[in-house]
């Protein structure tokens, strides 16, 4: 009887527990569905009140088994967990609420938008028919190349302000050739920067023509002076320069007083030779002037030539010897050697240049093959004195005359060639690299005496 009652009570308790679980699950599911509604539709009743389960009366009779009690405890714990979860959902309805349907997603709205877009496109097409087309962007103008300077340009000041201009004014004011005209020509020539020797030669040519009665018009004096000037330049044909042996570089020693443009002329020559396809090496033999080596290195980087240098204050002959030997190893085609350029009146400088020249010959037999003297045209007759001093020490084979464009003393060319019979190799008529020109006697005379 006792066993029957126990079995009957246990079944009843389990049935009640199962019913409670099912009821709680149904209520929890209904509550989840309710959270998708809007706040206006949400009942004011608290979530815990909606989910509160009716109390379950469980018999505490001693006849209830431990298994039944455990089932009831499990159901209670599940209920509490469900209620807590539902409270969290209720506190944040935004996180689980389904978004409302956007108005733009409705078919009728889409149709209206498409219709409006079509109207806008139609209007744009009509406007495009009458509106002027946008002009094509103008191409950026290419920079105009700088005009090429000519020898005539470089001698502009000499023609307008120098002895040529004075002679021109003299001839324009005279109608006949007489002694007074000859005296005035003499004064102009001897006060020009062409040197006494050259002035006397030009004056004698005029006198001889007058004595021979081959001149009747002062304007014909121009032809006589032009012819004699051409003869002076053609007579400067010193050929002391030599050629290197096959497989050896050509060594060019460059001289000049500081400030004449010596290092700049070396850089321009290097640029010319590199453009002609030669391998060029520069040697910084001027170890006395501050920053001389740095200036030469700058030119080397600019034109693509290697530069050999020593420490500031080092023995110039030693630096030059190493530089020339290095050129042989590097198989360079041309070596340009910069040298010291203090005042030409200093005896120690002349002796140093003689030593440097000898050292080059030890590095390469026959070097230097050329000795170029850089003269500043603005110094006038002083340039002739410089050339004379350097020539006695080093046997100059050619002249580079710089800064012709900035002076009215361009006639110094005639004085240098007439005094030393050394040819002018290059003339500088501007600051650009291209403004270092080959000297042509005929072109120079035409530019000098041009009207």
Image (cartoon, rainbow, N blue to C red):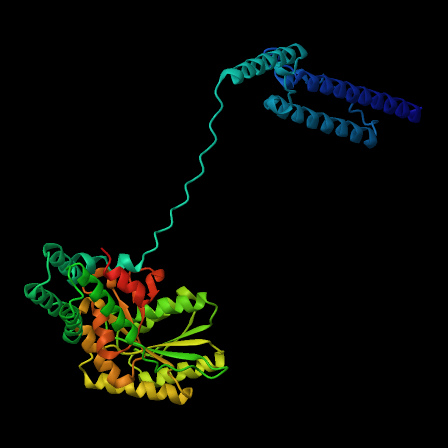
* Quadrant position of residue 235: bottom left
- How many numbered marks, from 0 up? 0
Which residue is found at the position 75% from the left and 29% from the top? 73
Q: Please name whichever residue, 234 or 245, is drawn nearer the observer in this view of the structure.
A: 234
Q: Where is the C terminus found, in terms of image quarters?
A: bottom left
Find residue 129 and report its horizontal and vertical position in percent: 53, 16
Q: Please name whichever residue, 300 or 219, is drawn nearer the observer in this view of the structure.
A: 219
Find residue 243 and report its horizontal and vertical position in percent: 42, 81
From this view, report whether residue 145 is shown above or below residue 18: below
Find residue 382 and report its horizontal and vertical position in percent: 17, 73
Q: Is residue 245 visible?
A: yes
Q: Is 25 situated left or right of 152 in this image?
A: right
Which residue is found at the position 26% from the left and 72% from the top? 231
Q: Where is the N terminus found, in terms of image quarters?
A: top right
* Quadrant position of residue 350: bottom left
Name, please, the residue furthest toward the left: 180
From this view, report whether residue 315 is shown above or below residue 178: below
Name, please, the residue furthest toward the front: 213
From this view, report whether residue 164 is shown above or below residue 14: below
* Quadrant position of residue 339: bottom left
Find residue 105 and report its horizontal and vertical position in percent: 65, 16
Q: Please name whichever residue, 242 or 352, is drawn nearer the observer in this view of the structure.
A: 242
Q: Is residue 298 visible?
A: no
């Amino acid at each position: 009887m006792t066993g029957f009652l126990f079995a009957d009570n246990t079944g009843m308790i389990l049935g009640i527990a199962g019913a409670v679980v099912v009821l709680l699950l149904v209520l929890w599911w209904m509550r989840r569905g309710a959270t998708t509604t809007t706040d206006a539709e949400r009942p004011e009743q608290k979530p815990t009140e909606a989910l509160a389960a009716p109390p379950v009366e469980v018999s505490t009779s001693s006849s209830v088994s431990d298994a039944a009690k455990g089932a009831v405890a499990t159901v209670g714990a599940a209920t509490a967990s469900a209620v807590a979860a539902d409270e969290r959902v209720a506190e944040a309805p935004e996180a689980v609420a389904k978004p409302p349907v956007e108005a733009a997603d409705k078919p009728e709205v889409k149709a209206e938008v498409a219709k409006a877009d079509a109207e806008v496109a139609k209007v744009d097409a009509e406007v495009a028919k009458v509106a002027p087309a946008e002009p094509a962007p103008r191409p950026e103008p290419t920079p105009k190349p700088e005009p090429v300077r000519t020898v005539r340009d470089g001698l502009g000041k000499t023609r307008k302000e120098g002895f040529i201009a004075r002679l021109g004014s003299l001839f324009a004011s005279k109608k006949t050739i007489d002694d007074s005209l000859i005296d005035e020509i003499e004064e102009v020539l001897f006060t020009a920067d062409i040197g006494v020797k050259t002035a006397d030669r030009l004056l004698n040519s005029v006198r001889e023509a007058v004595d021979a009665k081959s001149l009747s018009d002062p304007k014909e004096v121009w032809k006589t002076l032009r012819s004699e000037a051409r003869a002076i330049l053609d007579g400067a044909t010193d050929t002391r320069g030599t050629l290197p042996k096959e497989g050896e570089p050509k060594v060019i020693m460059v001289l000049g007083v500081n400030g004449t443009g010596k290092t700049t002329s070396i850089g321009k020559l290097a640029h010319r030779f590199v453009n002609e396809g030669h391998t060029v090496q520069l040697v910084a033999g001027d170890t006395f002037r501050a920053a001389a080596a740095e200036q030469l290195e700058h030119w080397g980087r600019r034109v693509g030539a290697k530069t050999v240098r020593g420490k500031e204050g080092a023995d110039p002959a030693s630096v030059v010897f190493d530089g020339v030997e290095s050129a042989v190893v590097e198989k360079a085609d041309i070596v340009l050697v910069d040298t010291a350029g203090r005042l030409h009146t200093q005896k120690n400088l002349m002796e140093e240049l003689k030593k440097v020249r000898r050292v080059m010959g030890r590095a390469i037999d026959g070097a230097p093959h050329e000795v170029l003297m850089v003269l500043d045209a603005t110094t006038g007759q002083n340039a002739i004195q410089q050339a004379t001093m350097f020539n006695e020490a080093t046997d100059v084979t050619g002249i580079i005359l710089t800064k012709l464009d900035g002076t009215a003393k361009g006639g110094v060319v005639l004085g240098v060639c007439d005094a030393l019979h050394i040819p002018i190799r290059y003339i500088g008529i501007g600051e650009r690299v291209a403004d270092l020109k080959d000297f042509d006697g005929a072109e120079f005379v035409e530019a000098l005496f041009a009207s």
